[in-house]
Image (cartoon, helix red, strand yellow):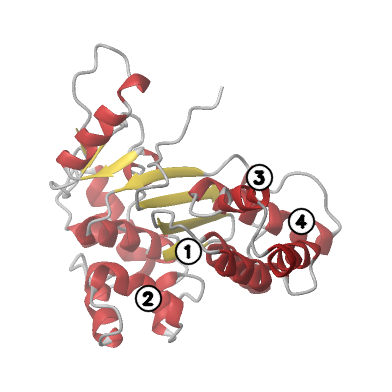
Amino acid sequence: MRKPRFKLPRESTAVYHCLSRIVAGEFLLAPNSVKETFRRMMRRQAAFCGVRIITYCLMSNHIHILARVPAQPDLPDSELLARLTDFYGKGAPETISIAESIETGGSIPEQDRVRLLKRMNDVSVFMKELKQRFTVWYNRKNGRFGTLWAERFRSILIEDRSDVVRTVAAYIDLNPVRAGMVEDPVDYRFSGYGEAAAGNELAIEGIESFEGTMGGDWRGVLGKYGETLFSKTGVGDAGGTQELEEIRRIWKARGKLSRNQTLLLHIRYFTDGAVLGSQLFVEELFEKFRDRFGPKRKTGARTLRCLPFKELRTLRALRVSAVE
């Protein structure tokens, strides 16, 4: 039986780190053209659902998306029609039907309005529809059938606080460095940081949402975020793959690593910790979801053992392979 996600109600703004893997770990997303199609679909789906992408990273066999889901507003009929038009096009049956209802009746029928609102401001709907639409496109293009994704997407609820969001965003944007694909994350096209560095406004807005004032000096904002993302670690002068291997060696030897160095490791707390944030935030969520835990558990917050993130806590304690 599936365990329910840790989600805040639609009346609250929430941030989620979402992860989904390709079936059997196949590298089906490897071609740049495939990644580009997914990115385009992701942006369109986010605009339709009212979800804001903070950052993301598209790898060859899995995806990461850090999304802020605003509290659901009371959307007017005109906004719902505009979203339908942008998403499906003016000539789509759904768009035409809703447009005719507004023109003839003055408003969208209540049953249609309720149905549309259920698709808005919900991380589960956003991810489900995005994955489904991409699967249909991919299978049709490649003469393929059947499932494309290994499982339902995983998500972790993130405290919407600048330092917490920044840490998780950096972990996501460092994926191609961690995989040895690039030495600097700015060189990877299919990530929020790489796209922002190339001047994409939506990607810039995502980073500005936690790193600085919206509409300010965005190059300064990216530079500040870049200091968190990646800097010379001081492990050695070789850089690249040798540096990564040295960081992993130090970790296995239980040596001391900086925060920047640690972010180059696989940290399952950021993908499987259920809830991530300050101790107060995690305890509040523990009380909110108290019925999901046994009576013997008295507190919710768990430390990220042996990691230099003393201000962070998770709801789920990971005892096996928490860091690799």
Residue 258 % position (x, y): 16, 58
* For residue 92, side relative to residue 1 (left or right): right
Q: Which one is nearer the viewer's eye here, 79 or 205?
A: 79
Q: Residue at x 18, y 45 (%)?
A: 278
Return the residue found at the far right.
143
The spot of residue 201 in percent (x, y) is 43, 82
Mark 3 vs mark 1, CA separation in Å: 18 Å
Q: Amino acid at mark 4?
A: Val
Mark 1, mark 4: which one is toward the viewer? Answer: 4
Separation of residues labelled 4 and 3 (CA atoms): 15 Å
For badge 3, the amino acid type reads Val
Q: Is residue 137 above or below residue 150?
A: below
Outermost residue on the top side: it is 295
Q: Which disc, if any, is residue 136?
A: 4
Q: Nearer the viewer, mark 2 or mark 4?
A: 2
* Mark number displayed over residue 23: 3
Of the image marks 3 and 1, the number of the one nearer the N terminus: 3
Which residue position holds label 1? 57
**Alpha-carbon span between mark 1 and mark 2:** 16 Å
Q: Which residue is mark 2?
A: 205
